[in-house]
Amino acid sequence: MVIHIIVTSINFIEMKNAIGLDRKKAKQLRSKLNLLLANYSIFYQNTRGYHWNIRGDNFFELHLKFEELYNDLLIKIDEIAERILTLGGNPKHNYTNYIKVAKIKESPEVSEGKKSVADILNSLSTIIKLQREILILSEKSVDEGTNALMSDYIREQEKLVWMYSAYLNK
């Protein structure tokens, strides 16, 4: 009886990672989070380009808003990478991989305000959709850490969608 309990306990422990999540589910989450990381990284670099190259009537307003956005994206990139590490994985870090897997593509047109804001809205749409997928997966995995992160991001970004959309509808 004691041997059976010990064997069962060992099997149970082997199925869980360091933070007590099912290893297979954590692997799925890491994969999705790496995809999210790739999309955030391309989005971040695009937003830096919008900030650097914006021209025209709303230069001062948009220059500042783009800087706020890329600073926020940089924080989220780091949090996502750290979450991947927490789940026992390794965050991908090269742009060669990002360009291959990301749904967000590099933006070649960065100097016109309305085009830049429209690109930001498209990127936010892609990001939010992926985060909702991760939210569902993290809920099924009983991964409250990833779930809370995605929930917070979605709430913040839904407000940004409203604000950037309002700008385009001036």
Image (cartoon, rainbow, N blue to C red):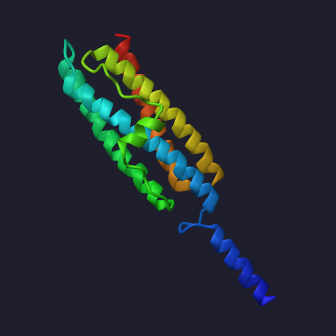
Establish if 12 lies above or below 99: below
Q: Is residue 99 left or right of residue 26?
A: left
Q: Is residue 12 left or right of residue 148?
A: right
- Quarter location, residue 54: top left
Front position in the image: 145 or 123: 123
Q: Quadrant of the N terminus?
A: bottom right
Establish if 165 lies above or below 68: above
Q: Residue drawn 62% across and 49% down?
A: 139
Residue 46 image point, x, y percent: 32, 30
Residue 166 image point, x, y percent: 38, 17
Q: For the view shown, which residue lies furthest in the right direction?
A: 1
Establish if 117 lies above or below 129: above
Q: Quadrant of the C terminus?
A: top left
Q: Is residue 93 left or right of residue 24?
A: left
Residue 158 image point, x, y percent: 46, 30
Front position in the image: 168 or 116: 116
For residue 142, say whether it is visible.
no
Q: Residue drawn 74% across and 78% down?
A: 8
Residue 125 image point, x, y percent: 48, 28
Front position in the image: 158 or 35: 35
Q: Residue drawn 53% across and 49% down?
A: 31
For residue 133, say whether it is visible.
yes
- Quarter location, residue 74: top left
Q: Is residue 70 left or right of residue 166?
A: left
Q: Residue drawn 45% across and 36% down?
A: 100
| Count of marks overlaid on the render | 0
